[in-house]
Amino acid sequence: MTNPENLALRRGIAGTVLFDGELASRGLALNTMCFSFNEAANRAAFLADEDGYCRQYGLTAEQRAAVARRDVPAMLEAGGNVYYLAKLAGIFGLNVQDLGALQTGMSVAEFKQYLLDQAADAGIGRGTDGVSSPIMGVAA
């Protein structure tokens, strides 16, 4: 049963999903499948038969549909953890910044600038010599 407080938190910050125990339980099959992509043979097997590979791991119809659509926000809502989903996204040539852009509805360039702006506002992202240091791989 969904905890009403957690449901409110999940919807409280635009573009984010609270990854709590309930969502972790729902996403176990999806995240386990994504973890399997550490092995090249599993990535190849997925690409050869995506739906069959998803079924092998017991993904729900909602999760399989989200994977087929490459719909990262829907995968997050279905229990996916962004760190595991990054393994799936990598198969399609996407990186964590691409995922962040998808989550927020921004372009990748807008999302990178957003990260830089947030770092500047927080006073981080500058080395002792005043030169930008990489933040999540974002070059200034």
Image (spheres, rainbow, N blue to C red):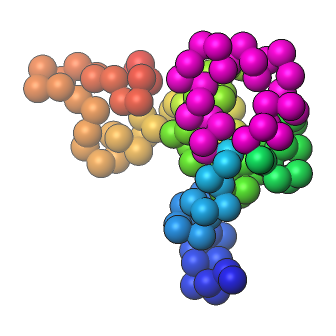
Specify whether 124 is left or right of 103.
left
Determine the residue positioned at 78% across, 37% down: 56
- Residue 113 appears in the figure: yes
The quarter of the displayed image where residue 95 is located: top right
Give the image location of residue 96, x and y in percent: 54, 31
Which residue lies most toward the left here? Answer: 128
Which residue lies most toward the front here? Answer: 56
Q: Tell me, yes or no, whether the highlighted magenta stretch contains residue 35.
A: yes
- Residue 101 appears in the figure: no
Specify whether 47 is left or right of 24.
right
Quadrant where the N terminus lies?
Answer: bottom right
Determine the residue positioned at 11% across, 26% down: 128
- Does 81 appear above or below 35? below
Determine the residue positioned at 64% across, 86% down: 4
Q: Tell me, yes or no, whether the highlighted magenta stretch contains residue 70.
A: no
**Region rendered in magenta:** 31-57
Residue nearest the viewer, comparing 136 with 128 = 136
Count of numbered tags: 0
Determine the residue positioned at 71% across, 57% down: 77
